[in-house]
């Protein structure tokens, strides 16, 4: 059942992003959607609304870009609690470091394996 919940929630987040691009006559670009999803995830996380979604849907809520905003916000909140004001800057980066590193490493290996052009 967790797979179904993850699929539905993650799919709905992606549907919202796609509808934003399709229904705004190309005024909303993929870059706008990227920033909007990360920002929305961070705001919803700071308000305490995103964690219940993560608890319900698991990877369906953490894998999309809104999940990245959530992890940045939670890291910043923990960083401030631990290190004060400087934690607002270091906490988010520390919390997201493993995911960012994985994306870079796997992207590098994919580029080596598939030889991208351009």
Image (spheres, grey):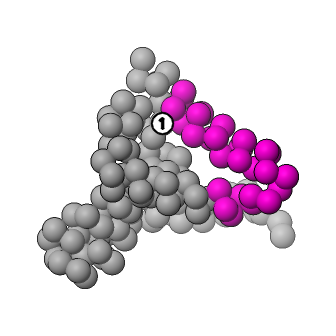
Left or right relative to 30: residue 92 = left
Left or right relative to 74: residue 69 = right
- In the image, farthest residue toward the bottom: 86
Residue at 46%, 64% (x, y): give it.
100
Q: Where is residue 33? Give x, y as percent.
A: 65, 56
Determine the image quadrant of residue 97: bottom left
Looking at the image, is 24 positioned above or below residue 5? below
16 magenta-colored: yes
Main secondary structure of the magenta stretch: helix
Helix or strand or loop: what does disc 1 sit on?
Answer: helix
Residue at 24%, 76% (x, y): give it.
87
Crowding around mark 1 (Cα neighbors within 10 Å: few <14, some 14 to 19, many 20+) is many
* Most foreground residue, 90 or 51: 51
Residue at 55%, 54% (x, y): give it.
37
| Residue occupied by mark 1 | 60
How many numbered discs sit on the rendered protein? 1
> For the magenta stretch, what is the residue range?
7-33
Can the viewer see residue 51 in this picture?
yes
Q: Where is residue 101? Give x, y as percent.
A: 45, 65
Q: Where is residue 50? Give x, y as percent.
A: 38, 44
Q: Where is residue 106? Give x, y as percent.
A: 55, 58
Figure quadrant of the N terminus: top left
Residue at 41%, 57% (x, y): give it.
43
93 magenta-colored: no
* Most foreground residue, 27 or 10: 27
């Amino acid at each position: 059942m967790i797979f179904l919940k993850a699929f539905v929630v993650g799919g709905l987040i992606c549907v919202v992003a796609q509808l934003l691009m399709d229904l705004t006559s190309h005024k909303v670009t993929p870059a706008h959607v990227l920033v909007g999803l990360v920002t929305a995830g961070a705001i919803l996380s700071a308000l305490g609304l995103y964690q219940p979604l993560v608890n319900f849907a698991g990877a369906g809520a953490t894998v999309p870009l809104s999940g990245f905003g959530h992890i940045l916000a939670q890291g910043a909140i923990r960083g401030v609690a631990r290190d004060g004001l400087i934690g607002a800057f270091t906490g988010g980066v520390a919390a997201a470091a493993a995911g960012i590193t994985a994306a870079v490493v796997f992207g590098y290996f994919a580029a080596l394996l598939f030889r991208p052009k351009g």
